[in-house]
Amino acid sequence: MKAAVFYGKHDLRVTEIDVLPPADNQVRIQVKFCGVCGTDIHIYEGEPGAAPVVPPTVIGHEFSGVVSAVGRQVTRFRPGDRVAADPNDMCGECYYCRNGMANFCENGIGIGTTCDGGFAEFVTVREKQVYPIPDHLSFEAASQAETLSCCLNGIDLCQIRAGQSVLIIGAGPIGLLMLQLARMSGAGKIIVSEIVPEKRALALKYGANIVVDPAGEDLYAVLAANTPNVVCVIECAGTIPTIAQAIRSAGKGATVMMFGLTAPDAETPIQPYDIFKRQLKLTSSFINPYTFERAVEILALGKVKVDEIITDIVPLPEINKVFNDSAYRRRGKVLIRI
Ligand SMILES: [Zn+2]
Ligand SMILES: [Zn+2]
């Protein structure tokens, strides 16, 4: 089969590799679409700490497809079933798994990081990682169940209550998903700060009440004029200036969700007295524990839309151009068609 194999920094090759039969408890999926994630870019750039990848490995972890073969112990799936899969396969036995924190599993397997993933014609995963998708849900949208499941963990931690004001910084794919989840969670006024005009327009379409261009407008003045208290700030840009902006924008008792991934060695100063005076909760969100089922359900119900978040679909043989040309990522979510 054809697969995009990561051999090391800036070395991703589309090549022929063997198709393996599924083990007894595994399902083999013929991949339809696999999204390019920021994590994949970090891996390609050889950045340490992004994900533990030992080359050669087929990367890609946001995939959907059709079951092509099942192992002997598999009971819930048959060839032909339409599915998505959670790439974070946890052991269920370590301290963290047994204490409700499976995202910190000590023996976790990452499909597309620690073992072969979805930028390939076939990917093999354990049955417990596989979720059926309904016929009306497109494979394109279903590939984003993984992204949405990570956002769900983040939004859960924000504990938004009905009517509260929320600020979202950055309206890329993650920001636009967070915006829709904040709306679903009952947020009152949602303000979105984003420098790209097209993304601001999408934010308005997806339920933002106010959009701000932080390059041309005074974000803090807009907030002061429109809400008595920003109760939750969701940072989705992952840069030091926007994290500082997120902390400064937060109201009293607010949660600052630092969802955007910064460089592993990035540092930012905080003023503890300032955190104290506003009783801020600074937090973050690590992968997608127990949220994949809900992500599929939300997509199936059409409560979160991803069609316009997906800006480019590129065939597998041309995958390298996505990694080499940052213009793709700036537009939005790129899917690889297998
Ligand atoms: Zn991802
Ligand atoms: Zn575990």
Image: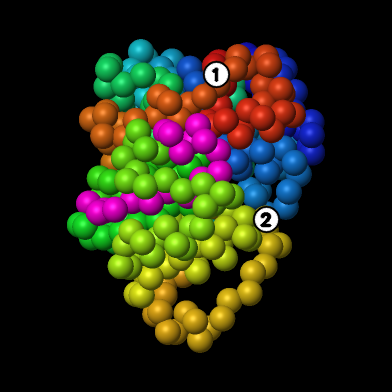
Q: Secondary structure at mark 1?
A: strand
- Secondary structure type for disc 2: loop
Which kind of residue does numbered mark 1 sit on? Ile
Q: Quadrant of the N terminus?
A: top right
| Residue 53 sits in quarter | top right
Q: Residue at x 56, y 81 (%)?
A: 271
> What range of the chain is rendered magenta?
186-202
Q: Nearer the viewer, residue 233 or 224?
A: 224
Query: Residue placed at 62% from the left, 55% from the top?
Result: 239
Q: Residue at x 21, y 57 (%)?
A: 163
| Residue assigned mark 2 | 263
* Residue 325 in sight in this render: yes
The reply to whether residue 17 is in sight is no
Is 290 left or right of 9, judged from the image as shown? left
Q: What residue did someone put label 1 on?
A: 313
Q: Is residue 289 magenta?
A: no
- Residue at point 59% right, 50% down? 215
Q: Hey, which quadrant is residue 300 in on the image? A: top left
State how many labels appear. Answer: 2
Q: CA distance from mark 1 to mark 2?
A: 27 Å
Percent x, y for residue 246?
Answer: 50, 62
Q: Position of residue 22 (x, y in %)?
A: 49, 25
